[in-house]
Image (cartoon, grey):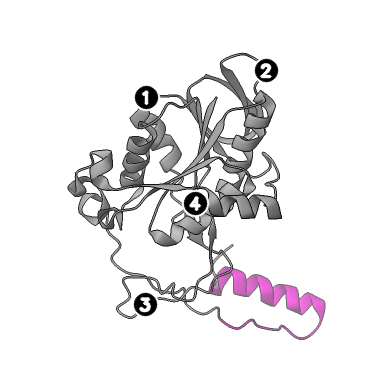
Amino acid sequence: MNILACIKHVPDTETRVKVASGGNALDLGEANWVVNPYDEFAVEAALQLKEKQGGGTVTVLSVGNDEAVKSLRQALAMGADKAVLCNDPCFEGSDAKGIAKILAEAIKKAPFDIIFFGKHAVGDDNQQVGSLVASLLNIPVVTVVTAIDYGEAGVVRCHREVEGGVEVVKAPMPCAITCQKGLNEPRYPSLKGIMAAKKKEVTVFKAADLGIDPAQVGKAGAAFAVKGYELPPPRPEGRVLGGEIDAQVKELVHLLHDEAKVI
């Protein structure tokens, strides 16, 4: 079985956000970069499926620069067999549609039975790439999955959390699945896995290798552009109400109604 997991190299969510001079970009010079947390669920799902099948190949794919190799190495250390990096200057600034096109063309390079994604990347929070890749590949997709059953041959039975309950969806393979927190607990790379990952090759694809026109990806092909960033205004100081409790309640209701206008 050929199992794929798509991951993204993102700034750690604990990174202190700074706006770069000019206001049209973020200053990530001091950021700590990691595997997108939701994509760790995707890698773990791929590894568990391989173990359940008693064999197969797990390939991790990413779009990014040379630094993204670190996240691919982590996935290899967890137990993935192969890694693919789509790295070309013209890919910089791609929106969700551009990233999906790049990944779809890379995926077409080899046979696959199932593709796992994180439900969204904490960098852009688009929650679009998995579904867009599936659309470009003309395969079914099940999103925000919290449990998977492979009991029926050639079919995956997925559980999705919905308001007020759980939705069960069946999809024939090949298909794509986006993984939600609760699906599994990602394993920690072992020392043996870390050492083995250093020896595994990372295949690099350029735009020409994928037959991609640079005008269709990157900033040139993006459907939208960021005009600027600004930090939220500082939170105003709170107010302490004095006096008896009855007077405090009346004053609080007055402030909420006439000043804050929330009731």
Mark 4–mark 1 CB contact (< 8 Å): no
Q: Is residue 51 above or below residue 31?
A: above
Instruction: State the mark number for residue 20.
Output: 3
Q: Is 255 part of what is drawn in magenta? A: yes
* Residue occupying the point 45% across, 38% down: 130
Q: Is residue 204 left or right of residue 242?
A: left
Closer to viewer: mark 3 or mark 2 = 2
Placement of the N terminus among the 4 image quadrants: top right
Q: Which residue is mark 4?
A: 121
The prevailing secondary structure element of the residues shown in magenta is helix
Q: CA distance from mark 2 to mark 4?
A: 30 Å
Q: Amino acid at mark 3?
A: Ala
Q: Is residue 114 left or right of residue 191?
A: left
Query: How far across and how far down the image is residue 225, in percent?
Result: 27, 58
Closest to the observer: 190 or 223?
190
Instruction: State the mark number for residue 151.
Output: 2
Q: Amino acid at mark 4?
A: Ala
Q: CA distance from mark 4 to mark 3?
A: 22 Å
Q: Which residue is mark 1?
A: 138
* Residue occupying the point 39% across, 55% down: 64
State the image quarter where residue 88 is shown.
Answer: bottom left
> How many badges with numbers are in the image?
4
Q: Is 198 part of what is drawn in magenta? A: no
Query: How far across and how far down the image is residue 14, in percent?
Result: 59, 68
